Image (cartoon, coloured by chain):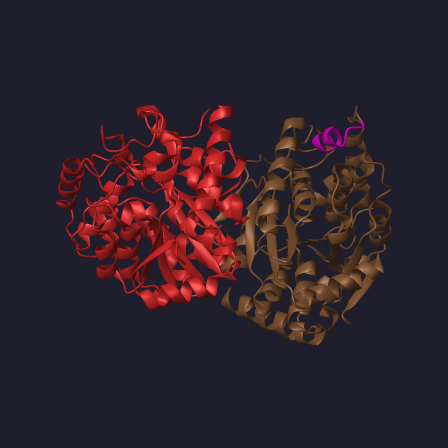
Chain colours: A brown, B red
Amino acid sequence: MENFELHGNIDQANNFIETMKSGRFLFSFVISYTETCEIPGITFAGADMNSIQFTPPADAEYLHYGYCKTIDKIPMTPDGKPTPGLLTKTALESSSIPHLTVNAGSKVLPQLPFIETGLQFGKNISTNDAMTDSQVSHAVDYGRIVGRSLASLTDCLVIGESIPGGTTTALAVLRGLGFDAKVSSSIPNNPVELKNHIADSAIERIDSDHPYSIVAKVGDPMIPFVAGMLSSAADVSKVMLAGGTQMTAVLAFASKIGFNEENTVIGTTSYITNDESANFTNLVKKIADIPAISVNPGLENSKYSGLKAFSEGFAKEGVGAGGSIISSMMKTGNDSTKYLDLVEKEYRRLFTSL
Amino acid sequence: MENFELHGNIDQANNFIETMKSGRFLFSFVISYTETCEIPGITFAGADMNSIQFTPPADAEYLHYGYCKTIDKIPMTPDGKPTPGLLTKTALESSSIPHLTVNAGSKVLPQLPFIETGLQFGKNISTNDAMTDSQVSHAVDYGRIVGRSLASLTDCLVIGESIPGGTTTALAVLRGLGFDAKVSSSIPNNPVELKNHIADSAIERIDSDHPYSIVAKVGDPMIPFVAGMLSSAADVSKVMLAGGTQMTAVLAFASKIGFNEENTVIGTTSYITNDESANFTNLVKKIADIPAISVNPGLENSKYSGLKAFSEGFAKEGVGAGGSIISSMMKTGNDSTKYLDLVEKEYRRLFTSL
């Protein structure tokens, strides 16, 4: 489709697009938390320091109810730019794609029914190991169960995530697993130095080449859990990892525990694939022989600065925005022009109701 | 199908059977708890007083893993008769029907991923109100959300439950809502007197004809939650309430909050529909114009006393056994002879591995 850019395994990308024209999608939204997000300047996924912990459950509530219960407004950056969940909500609602929330270690529980996994949130990797090895095993095992169950209910399981600070743990995991990774982030002047410093200091604690041990020391709960979901789900249905840098870390860890590449794609926004500070598509190619599909939501044409901002590098990805837009366009045949119209309607609804 | 007996709305029953020959089933297993089960002699759903609270999560674990984690063996009666979950497990596994566990107020959490609702367990209705009105609202609201989500992922949502002592709260709710109900139970010499006494004493506390208030005073969390599931799910897909007396209480409460009768059936075992101590099929007819489908699993022909016992009135129903057997027979075309063979295999597997 003309809305998409294809990277990596192009044949498989075209096969996926063809197959899913008539297929059912299920969006699973995995919320988690790492104390790494409490390092000043590392993330802007919240209006202030204290609100960051509420962003994952609030995103889940917004996707479901159209408003949040845990906080008054939808999650925003300190200067009032809205959560990429706005892009996801518009995509899922306009295409009637069902979604489920999965709690994989969120610090705050969402006020809606969700799939519970019993995972703890991750510790700050600049000072501590994120998890124990057995917590990583628990995450992978429960991820496998959830992935198998959800994949048996659809033709394509789309997996998005919300874990503030997650690009830094992703960077550390990628490097710990031996990949030369740069990260994207939700801030245009990506604090690369800070993230590199934290990742490198965390990596110094690695004392084993066992992937579980590496993720335990420098990762977060989302990475092994979603990798577990992928490893079982891709044997049952198509799977789309919906995200940027963080999903490359999931992919890197999943490549160590094994997954079915033939059923796997990664879907994101063109803001990620065009991001100079990251090397997304090359990184995906290095990790696995799968397609990366990116979509340009056309927000640069929006009359609203809050939407235009996404195209200018603020919150380029998150809440599975890219993958859910791709899924909705496949299902409805909408193009970026139509999508922009829909997302502007939702933007108006939100910012007149607030 | 010759395996089934049809009651109530026969045309709709035949239409359901015809439609679902090619349809997808999803089994949802709702676990809950009422302190009413702690009244001596009220239930045998557990080897002893202390183990009753572990029965719902252990049933969920057994359905998923094929063994339990919360307790060593599968749930049993004091004299060693196995849980009806054995019938459910055999049905779901032999027909590859996917299932999800939903926690709607279990006292003990299952050791697997499950859908969490934040509901508290119910109080003993012989001495207290079971819940507050707002807890009932929460149960209905969250039930609606879960029902809509799961129904959007299948053609028929099958709902089973596990709540020890639940036939007594069901009896109280049915009478509180004005239905002349007798109960079935997991004991051949059904302690009707005891249950009637508890139900009647509980009903004396009812001081409002509002259905929410009645369920709050004399019910349990499972009843409003599953009624909420039914009320939203039946607008999206077919729904089969899998159970006996307890599902008639769900049906009675759902008839007050409204649900789509055209998409609803109740499925159970012939041990329930033939139970002299209960008036199951008449009760269903009084509550709603829907079909009741019952199956004879043929366990009276088993060489194992532990299986034969079900046909002799021990644990005639539970864990959605009847509805899951009906669903599996619709999907696979198996008859009772084939099913008996499968369930005896599972029985051998369990009782040689214990």
User: Is the stretch drawn in magenta largely helix, strand or loop?
Assistant: helix
Task: Please tell me in which quadrant of the rendered image residue B308 appears.
Answer: top left
Does residue A54 appear left or right of residue B237 in this picture?
Answer: right
- Magenta residues, as a range? A209-217
Check the picture and name the quadrant holding the N terminus of chain A.
bottom right
**What residue is at 50 percent from the left and 52 percent from the top?**
A71
**What residue is at 83 percent from the left and 50 percent from the top?**
A289
How many numbered discs, if any?
0
Q: Nearer the viewer, residue A14 or B321?
A: B321
Task: Please tell me in which quadrant of the rendered image residue A123 appears.
Answer: top right
Does residue B169 appear left or right of residue A14 in this picture?
Answer: left
Provide residue A168's location: percent of width, then percent of height. Answer: 74, 41
Q: Nearer the viewer, residue B154 or B148?
A: B154
Provide residue B296's location: percent of width, then percent of height. Answer: 35, 48
Does residue A17 appear left or right of residue A283 in this picture?
Answer: left
Provide residue A324's location: percent of width, then percent of height. Answer: 66, 61
One can see residue A219 in this view: yes
Residue B274 is inside the magenta segment: no
Provide residue A104's location: percent of width, then percent of height. Answer: 59, 41
Q: Nearer the viewer, residue A120 or A7?
A: A7
One can see residue A42 in this view: no
Residue A214 is inside the magenta segment: yes
Q: Nearer the viewer, residue B103 or B56?
A: B56
From what the image shows, is residue A179 above or below residue B3? Answer: above
**What residue is at 25 percent from the left and 55 percent from the top?**
B281
